Image (cartoon, rainbow, N blue to C red):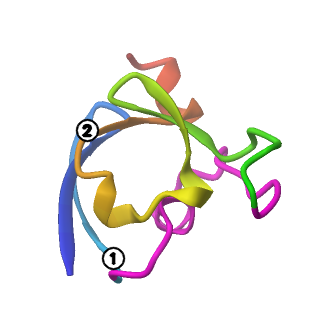
């Protein structure tokens, strides 16, 4: 299944599975600054900005993130 979103100020269409977490999808598409810290999202290593709001990408399904996502790779370009 495909989702369309803005990733680091670039409109992208990504191939995702319904059960996939956003963290896994972002790393597959080259956003290696997003890290797995723990299963509960307490470390903040998996934090991304979702429409300007910090969220734990390890606790969010990729299907729920069809908006603007900003990672460390995109901070310098925004």
Q: Quadrant of the C terminus?
A: top left
* Residue 63 percent coordinates (x, y): 30, 65
What is the magenta range? 18-39
Q: Residue 3 falls in which quadrant of the image?
A: bottom left
SS class, disc 1: loop
Q: Is residue 78 above or below residue 69?
A: above
Residue 62 numbered tag: none
Q: Quadrant of the N terminus?
A: bottom left
Q: Is residue 78 above or below residue 41?
A: above
SS class, disc 2: strand
Q: Residue at the spot x=39%, y=22% of the render?
A: 52
In depth, the one of 1 and 58 nearer the eye is 58
Taken as a whole, is the magenta stretch helix, strand or loop? loop
Q: Residue at the spot x=57%, y=58% of the render?
A: 59
Is 42 included in the stretch rendered in magenta?
A: no
* Residue 2 percent coordinates (x, y): 19, 73
Q: Residue 18 falls in which quadrant of the image?
A: bottom left
In depth, the one of 13 and 67 nearer the eye is 67
* Residue 19 percent coordinates (x, y): 42, 81
Evaluate if marks 1 and 2 touch, with contact meaning CB atoms under 8 Å apart.
Answer: no
Q: Residue at the spot x=32%, y=28% of the render?
A: 51
Residue 16 numbered tag: 1
The residue singled out by tag 2 in the image is: 10
Is 33 included in the stretch rendered in magenta?
A: yes
**Is 71 left, or right, of 4 in this rendering?**
right
* Residue 72 percent coordinates (x, y): 58, 31
Per the model, the C-alpha gap separating discs 1 and 2 is 18 Å
Q: Residue 64 falls in which quadrant of the image?
A: bottom left
């Amino acid at each position: 299944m495909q989702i369309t979103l803005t990733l680091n100020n670039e409109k992208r269409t990504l191939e995702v599975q319904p059960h996939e977490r956003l963290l896994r999808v972002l790393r597959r598409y080259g956003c290696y600054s997003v890290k797995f810290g723990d299963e509960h999202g307490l470390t903040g290593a998996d934090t991304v900005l979702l429409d300007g709001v910090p969220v734990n990408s390890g606790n969010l399904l990729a299907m729920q993130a069809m908006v603007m996502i900003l990672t460390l790779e995109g901070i310098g370009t925004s």
